[in-house]
Amino acid sequence: MALQLMKGSEAIAEAAIRAGARYFFGYPITPQTEIPEYMSARMPEVGGCFLQAESEVAAINMIYGAAGTGARAITSSSSPGVSLKQEGISYCAGAQLPCVILNVMRGGPGLGNIQASQGDYFQGVKGGGNGDYHLLTYAPASVQEAIDIMMFAFDKAEQYRVPVLFLADGLIAQMMEPVEMPEMVDFKIDPEKKPWACTGWQPGDDPAKRGVINSIYIDTESLSVHNAELQAIYRQIEANEKRWECYKTEDADIVLTAFGTVARVCKTAVDELRAEGIKVGLFRPISVWPFPYEALAETVLQDHVKAVLDVELNEGQMLQDVKLALNGGKPVDFFGHLGSEFPTVDEVKGKIKEMMKEGI
Amino acid sequence: MADSQVVFERTKLLTDKTFHYCPGCNHGIIHRLVAEAIEEMGLGRNVIGVAPVGCSVFAYDYFNCDMYEAAHGRAPAVATGAKRVVGDDRLVFTYQGDGDLASIGTAEIVHAAHRGEKICTIFVNNAIYGMTGGQMAPTTLVGQKTTTSPKGRDEAWCGAPIKVSEMLSAIPGSYYIERCAVNTTANIRKTKNAIKKAFQYQMEGKGFCMVEVLSTCPTNWGLSPVEAMKWLEENMIPYYPLGVYKDKGAE
């Protein structure tokens, strides 16, 4: 298939449509506004629905409504807007509604700025909304990877009945890259596959198939049972859905950890340092929830690895998961920027050399 | 007895679940009217209801059809998402109280009306937050005592009660808006007719419809059911006049 040059936001939107998404509800916010713009023109072409909501709050609740019928629904926003969506995201998680949510992260807190950031890692993987829930959360490092993940995101969401979150930074949406766009998936709502959905029921039908989209379990016992079911699903996801990339880690003295586009800066640093004879590797989580703790530990807890350097475009949020994975087994250092100023290859190389000078 | 025959049955659109509502609360009547309207119109399989947060939060347990339970105030957005998928063939209604619709959910209801969203809203207005134990609502009358307006609602401090039917009828996208009450047999019949009219308009693909139903809250008003009905007649109906506020179909 031929490569085509596409802007990230438009490529992600097109991939969602090819993956069967036919309902988009959203609200403009930089740096992801090209996604609703693209959807507004493209959805009618495929018999889908684009609706500009009055707020991010309304948009995620429209997703709740559409997903509850069994349709493939998607919304996108950027950090402050995703904060507004947290109420609805928690309800989607509680009501076990499959859907896809895009967060094109920008600088924060508050209004922050409109440049790329990775400041919503905690919000994405540690909660965000109220209650004990998780979102299957992916952090793509390229436009192509975002497309590829989108092509199975709805399948995973439906398999486990969880919302899927894309933690993409502003760069992913704003840059253009050559991509290969997959074929259109033929998706139709199948009431047999989604007996929980509101697909049409009347008295006399199988009571188990009445659609009740709900997250309230008012007595302690039933809420406890419901939460135990959710947790059992999360354990399954942890067992089956961890994704990561190891790059030149087999003989590395120092292993870099990074996610999203920052990992690409690190990859270049790895190549340039290796050209200088310094053995460095990169471990990149692709799923950030579930976080690939065991794979990271297995990669790093080797005799040849002397230390880990975590690099992020925030104050060190994934750093906590890196440390949890290693449990004190290796020294972990951090390099990052706040305010959306991207870490450069030279800075990462300089930090590595500094660590080596200090005897690591 | 061989000659006996069934002359009345409870609507199948309500489940067997026992209502949790307080004695004298009007939700029971209004639930029944909604359910009977659906059944009499033969909509059975083609209905999706959206319950609110408030006293009627468990409405999904009572209405015997596909149901959602929405976040507080968000029912019109949830209904929008569902309706945009299922289209004109299916009735989508929200059932909301005054705290849910007229306070935390004002953006959602106003914009659903503005879009001319083809959904129906049953708006139950009892001038108080019931489920949380009797706090001041946006619809609480001036001077009415609640647990958060212990000296009575002070208009100078927190404004006058919101008149939702009047407000939404001014929006071009709303199609049919009527305010009813269930204080008398005649008004109960009028309310049911209003609900059926709203549902009929939706099935004809018309715009946003809302039936506001004035309701009592004996528990939190601190009155007996009979006294509460009298209070509604003497205080609520004068401020919230009954009647059709908008009916594009009749124009």
Image: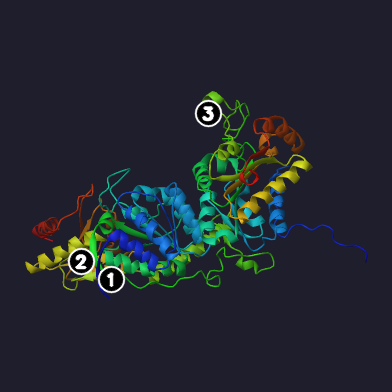
Q: Where, by quadrant of the figure, is residue B215 drawn? A: top right
Residue B52 placement (x, y as % from top left): 58, 49
Residue projecting furthest to the top = B156
Which is nearer the N-term, disc 1 or disc 2? 1
Instruction: Kindly identify the residue that appears in the image at 90 percent across and 62 percent down.
Output: B4
Camera-nearest residue between A50 and A84: A50
Residue A220 placement (x, y as % from top left): 57, 55
Left or right: where B193 falls relative to A11: right
Q: Chain of mark 3?
A: B
Under tag 3, what secondary structure? helix
Q: Are marks 1 and 2 on the same chain?
A: yes
Residue corresponding to mark 2: A282
| C-alpha separation, residue under disc 1 versus residue under disc 2 | 25 Å
Left or right: where B52 falls relative to A124: right
Q: Quadrant of the N terminus of chain A?
A: bottom left
Left or right: where A35 falls relative to A344: right
Q: Is residue A128 visible?
A: yes
Residue corresponding to mark 1: A180
Residue projecting furthest to the bottom = A1
| Amino acid bearing label 2 | Leu
Camera-nearest residue between A7 and A129: A7
